[in-house]
Image: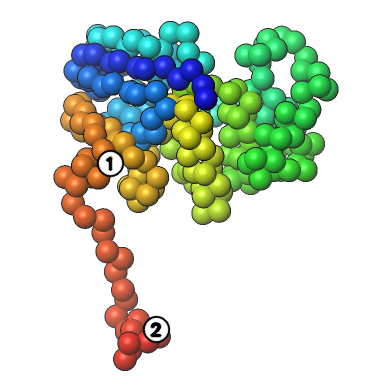
């Protein structure tokens, strides 16, 4: 178990300049909870995560419980140049900087931890490969290995499954659920409501600058039932698949 914080957000307003994106947000985040943040583009999902990660100053309101907690934040754009000449192990090892210091060379005694993290994300044996040789899904796996090594109490992820293949998504969702099972607080911004329904018990919905929070079933019920896939004409004949 970890020391995940109890986060209490009160009357929070977020935005850029004087233009608010999120207003009057009240939200209690229980330790060890697994929550999806949903909303249309521009509704404030990324803005809220940035504020919780300490990268954006609120326009108003308070966020109690974040000070002193170990927080990991993975934005949509990692900001890492894929052409930069570092290895997969080097990328994953960035997650150790909090433990060893930002200007200290990571010694060989950490190699076992790095290999373990890479194995957990399906990159066993890839430690020496350059990150430029990775596919999009493999690169995202390497970023998740970095998260494993950060060993945070609070994990904030912004669209972590976008533009990756189905197998990678399944593996990374499994890690997210495992982190929550370990008592870590995990908050994930998502656009895929099917993923939200299947894997996230709690949901915060942002719309029109306001927020609603509750069980995923409750929040998504106001959006209507899940869409039924359309079957092309002629796909079925006499009860058999054509």
Mark 1 secondary-structure assignment: helix
Cα separation, mark 2 vs mark 1, equals 34 Å
Q: Residue at x 67, y 20 (%)?
A: 96
Q: Any mark on residue 241, and which?
A: 2
Q: Residue at x 24, y 9 (%)?
A: 60
**Location of residue 11 with respect to 133 vertically, above or below:** above
Q: Position of residue 139 (x, y in %)?
A: 62, 39
Q: Residue furthest bottom?
A: 238
Task: Choose mark 2 or mark 1, whichever is in front.
Answer: 1
Q: Position of residue 137 (x, y in %)?
A: 59, 46
Comes first in the chain, label 2 or label 1:
1
Q: Position of residue 108 (x, y in %)?
A: 83, 22
From the viewer's perspective, is 219 left or right of 238? left
**Mark 2 and 1 residues: CB-CB less than 8 Å, in contact?**
no
Figure quadrant of residue 196? top left
Q: Residue at x 52, y 25 (%)?
A: 1
Figure quadrant of residue 142? top right
From the viewer's perspective, is 35 left or right of 151? left
Closer-to-camera residue (126/177): 177
Figure quadrant of residue 118? top right
Q: Any mark on residue 216, and which?
A: 1
From the viewer's perspective, is 152 left or right of 233? right
Q: Any mark on residue 59, and which?
A: none
């Amino acid at each position: 178990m970890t020391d995940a914080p109890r986060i209490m957000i009160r009357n929070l307003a977020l935005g850029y300049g004087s233009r608010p994106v999120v207003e009057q947000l009240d939200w209690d985040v229980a330790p060890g909870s697994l929550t999806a943040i949903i909303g249309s583009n521009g509704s404030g999902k990324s803005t809220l995560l940035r504020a919780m990660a300490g990268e954006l100053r609120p326009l108003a309101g308070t966020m109690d419980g974040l000070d002193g907690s170990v927080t990991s934040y993975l934005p949509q754009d990692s900001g890492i140049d894929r052409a930069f000449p570092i290895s997969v192990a080097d990328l994953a090892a960035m997650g150790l900087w909090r433990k060893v210091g930002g200007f200290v060379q990571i010694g060989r005694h950490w190699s076992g931890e790095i290999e373990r993290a890479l194995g957990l994300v399906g990159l066993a044996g890839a430690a020496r490969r350059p990150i430029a040789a990775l596919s999009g899904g493999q690169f995202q796996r390497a970023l998740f290995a970095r998260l494993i090594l950060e060993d945070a109490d609070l994990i904030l992820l912004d669209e972590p499954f976008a533009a990756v293949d189905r197998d990678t998504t399944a593996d990374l969702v499994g890690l997210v659920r495992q982190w929550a099972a370990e008592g870590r607080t995990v908050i994930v911004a998502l656009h895929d409501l099917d993923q939200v329904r299947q894997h996230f018990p709690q949901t915060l919905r942002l719309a029109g600058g306001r927020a609603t929070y509750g069980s995923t079933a409750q929040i998504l019920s106001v959006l209507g039932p899940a869409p039924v896939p359309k079957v092309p004409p002629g796909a079925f004949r006499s009860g058999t698949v054509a």
